Amino acid sequence: MSVARSRVLSGFRRLNRARIQLFTGDDHAIQVSRMQMRAEFERNKAVATSGPEFEAMVAGIDEAADMLRHEIVRGDLNADTGRYDVKIKREHVKGSDTGETKPQVEPITEETVRRMENPGAVETHSVYDWTRLGIFTGFRASEYSQGDLGRGKLFNKIPDQHDVPKQFRGMPLAMMAQDFRFFDKHYVLIPHKHLITRYKRGDVVWLELRWKYDKSSFNFVKKRFKITGHPIYCPVDAAVCIIHRSTLLGVPTAYPVGVWGSNTSSYRFLKSREVSEVMRGSVDMAYPDPNHYLRINRHLIVPHSNRVTAAVCLQKGGANNDEIAFRLRWLPSSVPTYLRDCFQSIGDTLERTIQGALKLTFSSSSSSSSSSS
């Protein structure tokens, strides 16, 4: 099944669940809404599975499902009173300040990242490196970890479809070693085989990342990140650790580098479920009080939290929705959805570092992305 078809079917299921949830008990509404929904999907089945029109339609599915879940309240006629009884459910309750509904993802905080730092747990430390890189890049889960895999599949691959250049079809969907390029202060490329030696000498200054397949108009972009000098919040340091780990574990060049393992065992690809478990465990350690907001909402800490963390920091640094969308490869309409009423106390150091990285890389990334799309 192609990625585009999978996205449409996933959206169809979400919309269908929202429809059933709203109209359960009203047989006429259930029947009519089902017919209308199917008719709308049939009407648009000839639309090309790539490009702005397709992306707008997929976004429209999510918006429609969100509207059915959060913005429509059903009223049932009370035969005794002649009035309509309305049941307000939890999903209809507005936020206390913003008037928005609760988002489904919470960000990663500075304290949470610090709890992942312990190198004694090889799985945790791998997630630690991908998290501290992801808060700069806004990685999607599929770009560094593996979701549900079919039998016999080692990792997810880029689909074989017309909007993907032939040289990328069948390659890993997640980041590979060749998607990481490092440069010195003179912008001279540093080969991976010399990376650790050159990094210890202080020669590695720039990281360039390539996104092979992004499921959007931002396909095949390249973005650059400069060394920050911070011992934790540095995209270059995190990327060096990721490549060094994959080299030590003997990961083939044609495989993803989102792996974990030790020198005495074979490597394993990171799974999205494992990433969530490490992140939530770090939240528990960072906030021992079970009544803390993030402990209560720990189920909202997911691999996608990297993107929300980056968005919150950029917004607090003065970036507008369009800038955030470009920086994190989102549709502009998605930004307020993820930012509404989410936890804002990320940490001053983390916020300043990411905001500084935006100033360093935004202009250069703009030109790189426009030429690579």
Image (tube, rainbow, N blue to C red):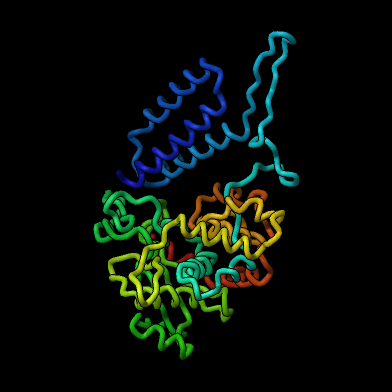
| 212 relative to 205, above or below | above
What's the residue at 50%, 20% (across, down)?
30
In the displayed orientation, state which residue is furthest to the left.
166
Q: Nearer the viewer, residue 365 or 4?
A: 4
Quarter-wise, where is residue 57 in the image?
Answer: top left
What's the residue at 57%, 57% (across, down)?
308
Viewport quadrant of the C terminus: bottom left
Total label count?
Answer: 0
| 342 relative to 119, above or below | above
The image shows residue 153 at horizontal and vertical percentages of 29, 54
The image shows residue 289 at horizontal and vertical percentages of 71, 59
| 337 relative to 127, above or below | above
Asked whether the viewer can see residue 143, the reply is no
Q: Nearer the viewer, residue 239 or 289?
A: 289
The image shows residue 126 at horizontal and vertical percentages of 46, 69
Viewport quadrant of the N terminus: top left
The image shows residue 101 at horizontal and vertical percentages of 65, 42
| 82 relative to 255, above or below | above
In the displayed orientation, state which residue is furthest to the bottom.
201
- Lateral position of residue 292 relative to residue 368, left or right: right
Asked whether the viewer can see residue 128, the reply is yes
